[in-house]
Amino acid sequence: MEQEVLHDYMLVVHPDAQTVQDVSMYKHLIAEELGTAAGSFTQAHIALFRSEFPERYEELFVTMLDRLVADQSAFTVYTSRIDHSRHASGRHMFYVNVANPKPLEELHRKVMQAFELEPAGYRPHIALARSLQPHQFTQLSPYLSGKVFVRSFHCHSFSLLRRAAGSDRYELVREFLFGREVPSSHPLFHRAA
């Protein structure tokens, strides 16, 4: 029997054009400082979900997401600063934090429930640089640590992206518009940024 080819699927929220441009500026500065190729990074996004599965399940995935967004309200995403974390592997990541994570955490929870998966440790963010070696982290820290990055954008949709095995580029499968444009009644700040 022929082995099915898996695709890498990712659900993402895209910030507005100004935030994307501002994040790109930081990514270019990071690439310049580290001496890496400036075109090797992805467009600014907040990942909601990522999984690999055969393409034959894509239609079912799309149907589940259609149902999920039908009753989803739009909301505003606020950012406040550039932060960093250290992974168990010893590598570091710089990211733009989300000052009001609750609406995105709730959306992530709904996606996980749709797939009958347990949500675990989701923290919404916009990655600037990931998998940094300790010396790269030290090199970038003076430019990034604690920098203020106050932006806001209206979130009224998310996108399903797909990439084939061996590819480094995602392609858009579909954008899902939320069914209700009325902003949700979530408190502005759920926890300190």
Image (spheres, helix red, strand yellow):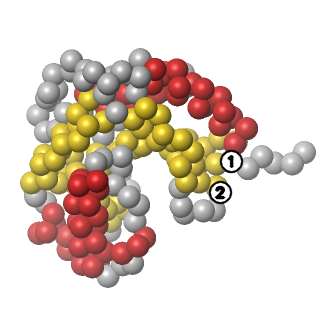
Instruction: Measuring from the top left, give residue 116's x and y in whole percent.
Output: 54, 21
Q: Amino acid at mark 2?
A: Ala
As drawn, is 87 to the left or to the right of 77?
A: right
Is there CB contact under 8 Å for labels 1 and 2?
Answer: yes
Instruction: Measuring from the top left, give residue 160's x and y in whole percent.
Output: 51, 41
Q: Amino acid at mark 1?
A: Leu
Question: What residue is rendered at 21% in x and 21% in y?
Answer: 186
Please tell me how many numbered marks the rendered image carries: 2
Mark pair 1, 2: CA separation = 7 Å
Query: In terms of image quadrants, where is residue 136?
Result: bottom left
Instruction: Measuring from the top left, give residue 171's x and y in whole percent.
Output: 55, 54
In this figure, which residue is indicated by the disc labeled 2? 165
Question: What residue is rendered at 39% in x and 78% in y?
Answer: 37
As drawn, is 56 to the left or to the right of 103?
A: right
Question: Can residue 30 be seen here?
Answer: no
From this viewpoint, which residue is outermost toward the front? 181
Which circle marks residue 6 in the picture?
1
Q: In the picture, which quadrant includes the C terminus?
A: top left
